[in-house]
């Protein structure tokens, strides 16, 4: 781009001298005001460069002068950024706290899937007018077994199945003792759901863990029937799994209900047709339920001729597993962030 011979009114040698002088002034400017002076001197209206541009006579000279102007403007910009940054840093150093700077956002966690499911269960029952309660995890055998009408030979009373602290104190094996606490605290009608940790001496595998969570519902009122139990479970299962779910009962045995049933919910993957998730049955087991045994009501001084009730218990891990298609329950306890971040 440089041409031989004179360029405009400024010879090539002069151009080079001008460029190195201007570049020196720009890079040597120690403050923004010194830089402004250099800008006026080398690029201002009366600068040698502008005068030369005004006197340009040929294309080549014009190109060379414009290129020089471009380089000097760029150098000015760059130096101006450097000085501004340095000045900001000096100011920050002087007044260490600048409350006007944007903060750095801390990383945001998510609620553990069990906590999320617990809150959904609570919402479903609060919508039905139930009270939510949390009871103690260390129980006496009286509340964990006796008042729930467990027979003396029941295997859960054995230290092989349950964690005993001494022979009358046990880590609760289910949330059912909450039924007794609720019934002893006040008179029916009672509509409550109790949620929390339970403990059993289970060997750890894909579906068992010695600590787990249950929710336990209890309703005691005048004239409650199995139909109320089924309607309540249907409402809750639909709240947790979706409106198209169905519920069925299979007869079973529990010490504190008569009759006792295990509720199943229709499989959401095959809609009841049968698939690997439901082992071709079309149904998923949900826990236990039944009509409160009159013997339990008698244990807490409630007149079984006047009052009747229903109860049910389900595992929160099971709900979380089905909701999120978790292949292994241990994922809920290992606290691996790569897993937990997905929920
Ligand atoms: N407590 C039972 C268990 O852990 C589940 C259960 C069954 C709870 C029947 C109930 C019920 O409230 O009525 O296996």
Image (cartoon, helix red, strand yellow):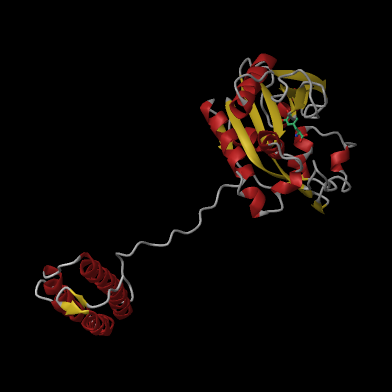
Say above or below: 41 vs 179: below
Relative image position of residue 11 (x, y in whole percent) = 20, 80
Relative to residue 261, is residue 81 drawn left or right? left
In what quadrant of the picture does the C terminus appear?
A: top right
Relative image position of residue 159 (x, y in whole percent) = 87, 48
Q: Of 8 and 154, which appears nearest the observer?
A: 8
Q: Residue 291 falls in which quadrant of the image?
A: top right
Relative to residue 147, is residue 17 drawn left or right? left
Q: Of 248 and 332, which appears nearest the observer?
A: 332
Image quarter for ligand 1 equals top right
Say above or below: 23 vs 138: below
Q: Could you tell me if residue 172 is visible in this image?
A: no
Relative image position of residue 147 (x, y in whole percent) = 75, 35
Q: Please, which residue is most extreme toward the front here? A: 5
Q: Residue 197 falls in which quadrant of the image?
A: top right
Relative to residue 37, is residue 342 drawn left or right? right
Q: Residue at x 78, y 44 (%)?
A: 141
Q: Residue 246 falls in which quadrant of the image?
A: top right
Q: Of 118 and 108, which appears nearest the observer?
A: 108
Relative image position of residue 245 (x, y in whole percent) = 66, 20
In what quadrant of the picture does the N terminus appear?
A: bottom left
Q: Could you tell me if residue 161 is visible in this image?
A: yes
Q: Please, which residue is most extreme toward the left here? A: 46
Q: Residue at x 87, y 36 (%)?
A: 154
Labels in figure, total: 0
Relative to residue 108, is residue 323 drawn left or right? right
């Amino acid at each position: 781009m440089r041409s031989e011979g004179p360029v405009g009114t400024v010879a090539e040698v002069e151009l080079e001298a001008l460029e190195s002088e201007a570049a020196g002034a720009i890079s040597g400017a120690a403050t923004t005001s010194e830089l402004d002076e250099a800008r006026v001197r080398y690029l201002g209206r009366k600068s040698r460069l502008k005068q030369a541009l005004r006197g340009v006579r040929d294309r080549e000279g014009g190109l060379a002068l414009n290129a020089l102007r471009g380089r000097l403007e760029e150098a000015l910009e760059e130096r101006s950024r450097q000085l501004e940054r340095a000045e900001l840093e000096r100011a920050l150093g002087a007044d260490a706290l600048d409350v006007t700077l944007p903060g750095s956002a801390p990383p945001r966690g998510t609620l553990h899937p069990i906590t999320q499911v617990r809150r959904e269960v609570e919402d479903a029952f609060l919508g039905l007018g139930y009270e939510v309660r949390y009871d103690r995890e260390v129980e006496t055998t009286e509340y964990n077994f006796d008042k729930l009408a467990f027979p003396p030979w029941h295997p859960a009373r054995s230290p092989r199945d349950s964690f005993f602290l001494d022979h009358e104190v046990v880590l609760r094996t289910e949330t059912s003792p909450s039924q007794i606490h609720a019934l002893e605290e006040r008179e029916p009608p009672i509509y409550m759901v109790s949620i929390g940790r339970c403990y059993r001496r289970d060997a750890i595998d894909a579906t068992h863990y010695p600590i787990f969570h249950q929710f336990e519902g209890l309703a005691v009122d005048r004239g409650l029937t199995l139909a109320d139990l089924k309607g309540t479970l249907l409402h809750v299962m639909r709240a947790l799994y979706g409106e198209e779910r169905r519920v069925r009962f299979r007869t079973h045995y529990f010490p504190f209900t008569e009759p006792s049933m295990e509720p199943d919910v229709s499989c959401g993957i095959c809609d009841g047709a049968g698939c690997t998730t439901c082992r071709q049955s079309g149904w998923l087991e949900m826990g236990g339920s039944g009509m409160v045994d009159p013997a339990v009501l008698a244990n807490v001084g409630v007149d079984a001729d006047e009052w009747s009730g229903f109860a049910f218990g389900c595992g929160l891990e099971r709900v979380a597993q089905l909701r999120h298609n978790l292949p292994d329950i241990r994922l809920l306890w290992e606290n691996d962030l790569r897993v937990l971040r997905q929920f």
